[in-house]
Amino acid sequence: MRSKKTITVITMLLLSAALVFAASAESLYADFQTAVAASDVQAAIDAWDKLQDQIDDERQDAYKDIDKARDKNDRQLYASAAAELRRLNSYAITPEDSDALLTAMLNSDSVDDSQTAWLYENSASYHPVLTLSAQTNNEGYSQTYRRSFSMAPGSQITLPSSTNVSARHAGVLAGWGLTPDEVTYQPGQTISMPATDQTLYAVFTNEVTFTDGDNVTSVTDVAEGDVISVPAPSVPEGAIFDGWYDEYSGLYLAPDETSYTVQGSGASFRALYVSAEASELSSGNYSTDSIPSNVQIPLSAALVNTGTEDLHDVSVTVTSDSQYARLLNTNAFLRSFPAGGSVTMRGTQLVVSADCPSGTAIPVTVTMTDNEGNSFTSSFTLTAR
């Protein structure tokens, strides 16, 4: 009976040892290589992910042996543990493995971005590159623009809406193409990072465009020296038109110019305008529809530069023409107010007199004036309790 128990225990130990061996890093790496050879992408991914977990476990054991070796001054144990770490660090997806897996991925019924992204993250030899290229040769002027991306396949990339190539020499960017003469993607379009190296070429057209907000006026098939009409701009209500500007060529047309003589192959003008507003007036913890009297009410104004140009040396003033309102700390100053920027003006206080009838409307005006004399006014109404 005792002999049978002994045999059973030995058998269980042998089985346990076999299971440990089957899950070893060496065994899992062999499974990965087998899957690669068979072009079984998912099996290769599963084996590699399991391998990384096993390597982490075995690496921790090796570090523990190193600590023991140091404590006991055991050089043999230290050398053995160090060799184990080198072995664990040797497992890698080789360039040949990467090429075989990528081939299998690209020749499947449908390319799975998650698989190519996995290969990008785990293989040091797989890093596809997307290159944007623009070549300009015009009447002795030559300029080359190149920009490259290396990202996980499937990552989103927004193509430039223009390049740093002067529009005056190259014309207007019509889009980006897989060939230099045909548009595949529109300027500013968002595309997915490809799984292999690709080059997109800037495609230009001889054209002059004028853009104001969502409106685009185009004059096509232009040539240098042509005289074209400058359209009347459409700018937001309350904005002040400040001319047309092509930021890539540096060309500027003043607000009163009605014609333009084409230079080079074209230009891309955008309307300039200055505009600002106080988008909101808040009264702290008090409701704007129920302002009490004989209390200092904190007022905060949300200021927004809604124009296309930066504002400078902006004076901000809060006023009210109500006989019942008294305002304190009514002025602020902004040295620079960038286009699209926002800031909150705090510190102004409102005191409503005790004799103010309930329900009285109290007008409050926020005025912003820049260093060129442009002034923008926003009006609000508070109600007395």
Image (spheres, grey):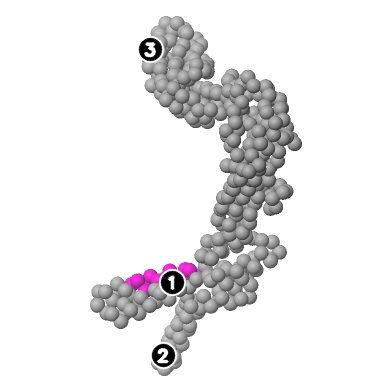
Gap in angstroms between the C-alphas marked 3 and 2: 95 Å
Please tell me which of labels 2 and 1 falls first in the chain. Answer: 2
Indicate the position of residue 347 as horizontal and vertical percent values.
Answer: 38, 21
Which of the 4 quarters of the picture holds residue 274?
top right
Indicate the position of residue 301 as horizontal and vertical percent values.
Answer: 46, 22
Residue under label 3: 294
* Element at label 3: loop
Residue under label 1: 89
Of residues 16 and 375, which is closer to you in this image? Answer: 375
Task: State the residue at coordinates (29%, 75%).
Answer: 68
Residue type at tag 1: Asn
Indicate the position of residue 28 as horizontal and vertical percent values.
Answer: 51, 75
The label shown at residue 6 is: 2
Gap in angstroms between the C-alphas marked 2 and 1: 40 Å
Q: Residues within 10 Å of mark 2 (few under 14, many from 20)?
A: few
Front disc: 2 or 1: 1
Give the left or right position of residue 3, taking residue 75 as reference: right
Residue type at tag 2: Thr
